[in-house]
Image: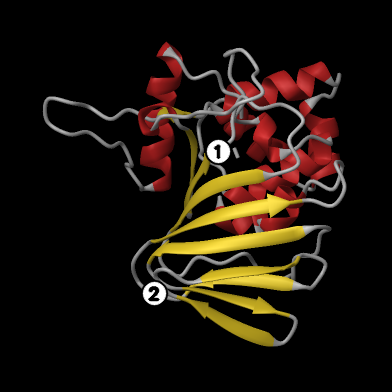
Amino acid sequence: MMDSDHVHGEAEGNATKEAQASGSGQKRKSSGNALFHQQVNVGAALQHLRTKQGLSIRALAEKSGLAVNTLSLIQNNKISPSVATLQSLASALGVPITSFFENDSPKSRVAYIKASQRIRAVFAHGMLEDLGMGLPYRTVEPFLVTIEPNANSGAQPIVHTGHEFVFCLEGRIVYIIEDKTYLLEVGDSLLFESHLPHRWQNVEAVPAKTILVLCPGESRDEATQRHFLPEVLRKI
């Protein structure tokens, strides 16, 4: 997640609000040659997806299990949702989480994304960047995931169809698959059948970064939503 927030002029202002709300302040610049990542406007995307389906905020609250006030604050960009919260919203709306990343650029059969053009979603416990935006109907969902210190996927194990691949770029991440623990350090990778109950956690006091590739076995499985399962309200 990650919304289609069509991140142009207004999105940059919202980006600042979201970064401040999450405490991340993640805006990368280099002297003389600014590197700008388009910021996801979660509120605008949520409103678009909700109204497109003819749902009131109250109806969406009932479907997602979130409070009406929480949805209102997210939609008005007053708070920055966690990945888990966005997962719950995507699941309730019946859309993949990548719907929150889509922008107005033309769709293509080739997704070539410069580092300065990546769309990202900043959340309370990290950042998610869609590495395959612009390619419709894809069966592979690649993301660059930044996880805040000690953040985790929640107490509930994750289960979905297909396969999941993780490559550790920075820090140390623990994956628990069934009853077995796998420690991923820089350069380590993990590929497994996603129907096996699994959870993840950043076990260090510094941010971790991974490449996450989800390959759902069914087009409607929405593996990304399941991957970042909630402790929804606690993380907002």
Figure disc tally: 2
Label 2 amino acid? Glu
Could you give the CA–CA distance between mark 1 and mark 2, rounded to whole angstroms?
A: 24 Å
How far across and down, in percent of the image, does residue 149 sit?
A: 40, 66
| Residue identified by numbered label 1 | 130
Q: As drawn, is 120 to the left or to the right of 61? A: left
In the rendered image, the vertical position of residue 232 relative to residue 111, given as above or below: below
Q: Residue at x 68, y 22 (%)?
A: 47
Image height of 143 relative to 188, above or below: above
Badge number at residue 95: none
In terms of secondary structure, where does tag 1 sit?
Answer: strand
Give the answer, above or below, for where 191 lies relative to 88.
Answer: below
Q: Position of residue 202 (x, y in %)?
A: 47, 70
Asked whether residue 229 appears in the rendered view, the answer is: no
Tell me if residue 163 can be seen: yes
Dot 1 amino acid type = Asp
Q: Would residue 109 be found to the left or right of residue 145 on screen?
A: right
Q: Circle 2 is placed at which residue position?
A: 204
Using residue 121 as the reference point, say whether residue 199 is left or right of it: right
Question: On the image, which quarter does residue 48 sit in?
Answer: top right
